[in-house]
Image (spheres, rainbow, N blue to C red):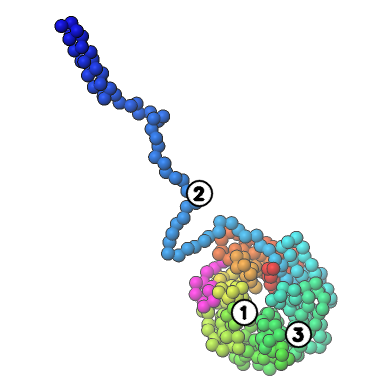
Amino acid sequence: MKKFNFLLIIFFILITFTCSKKNITEPSSSENTVPALTPTPFFTFSFTSTFTFTPTFTPTPYGKIVYASNADGDSDIYIFKFSDYSITNITNNTGFDSYPCWLANGNQIFFVTDRSIGFGYDIYCMNQDGSNVFECVGTSADKYYPRKALINTSKEVYYHKYNSTTSKYEICVYDYPANREVVVLSSTGANYQWCDYSYTLNEIVYTSDSTGYKEIYKANSDGTNRIQLTTGLYTNTQPKFSKYGDMIVYSADSNYDNKGEIWIMNSDGSNKRQITFNSDNDRLPCFSPDGYWILYVKYNSSGLGDLYIKPANGSGVEQKLLGISNTDESLPDWFMY
């Protein structure tokens, strides 16, 4: 009987211990909690119907700029290089050398000069160090603003010249194989000036006052299919194509004060937007070949110019690039290699 009671007590102890163990709750500490693994990606991507890349940095301008300056007392041609910020005078004579323009090879320069005594302003070419100077277009009329086209073809260089018979300016192109000048745009009642040529489009853009105001037009390289791109009761002038011809930069007197502001539009005349906002006189703009910068001339009240640059999207502030007190830096053209 004693043995039976003892076994019964042991049995109840085992049952009690087992039940109490089932009710034990693990402490909820961070050491005993396994966190859910959520991988952290190194890159995040956003997918939309159109992929747009917007750089968060400002590209450093590079290359070289040819321009005209009277720093030595008369108008000469200079080259500025971004690589070392050097300035080199590549023409040095007592005559008039101006309206420079890079050829497509970046090693030669068109310019206007009065070296042909008695024959007005003619178009010459030279190497970028000022050597190997030779005459390209030498008719009797004064010629201005040569623009590179297709070398050694029927469209080698575009320019505008003064027609003394009509007292108007007309746009011409020089036919190199035939050794002759071809008039592209001319009228007894209107001026045609400031022509630029696009290799990509095989088109020209230019200024004409045929409506009574100076407006910007586009046409085929032979002057056909003329399209007016600007309309306004003020001057729109000095257009230049971007490298691939998709945009045009120009100067407009949009403040009605006879002072220019810099504007950009698509090559079909759409999406016009103002780049500079000031009371200065900003003229003669051109794109950097990478399309990021606009280079232009800011003239003071004395008519003397300094060279400035500003991002083509209009952001940031304009930066003075070249300018010497009491001198005129003007007519720039930018080449990147």
Q: Which of the numbered marks, if any, corresponds to residue 136?
A: 3
Q: CA–CA distance between discs 2 and 3?
A: 60 Å
- Name the quadrant of the C terminus: bottom right
Residue at position x 76%, y 80% in the image: 125
Viewer-side residue, 70 vs 154: 154
Segment colored magenta = 265-275
Give the crowd class for mark 3: few <14, some 14-19, many >=20 residues within 10 Å.
Answer: some
Q: Earlier in the sequence, mark 1 or mark 3?
A: 3
Secondary structure at badge 2 equals loop
Query: Rounded to the nearest whole Å, what is the CA distance between mark 2 and mark 1?
Result: 44 Å
| 214, above or below 321, in the image | below
Q: Amino acid at mark 1?
A: Tyr
Q: Which one is closest to the eye, mark 1 or mark 3?
A: 1
- The residue labelled by disc 1 is 199
Residue 179: % across, % down: 73, 91
Q: Secondary structure at mark 1?
A: loop
Give the number of the disc on residue 42: 2
**Position in image of residue 201 (x %, y %):** 57, 80
Q: How far across and down, in percent of the image, does residue 249 sit?
A: 59, 72
| Nearer the camera: disc 2 or disc 3 | 2
Cα distance, mark 1 to mark 3?
20 Å
Contact between labelled residues 1 and 2, with CB atoms less than 8 Å apart = no
Between 89 and 318, the residue placed more toward the observer is: 89
Q: Which residue shows up at 66% across the image and 86% down it?
A: 155
From this view, report whether residue 322 is shown above or below residue 265.
above
Is the C-beta separation of discs 1 and 3 under 8 Å? no
Q: Amino acid at mark 2?
A: Phe
Residue, x 23% and y 15% (percent of image)?
A: 13
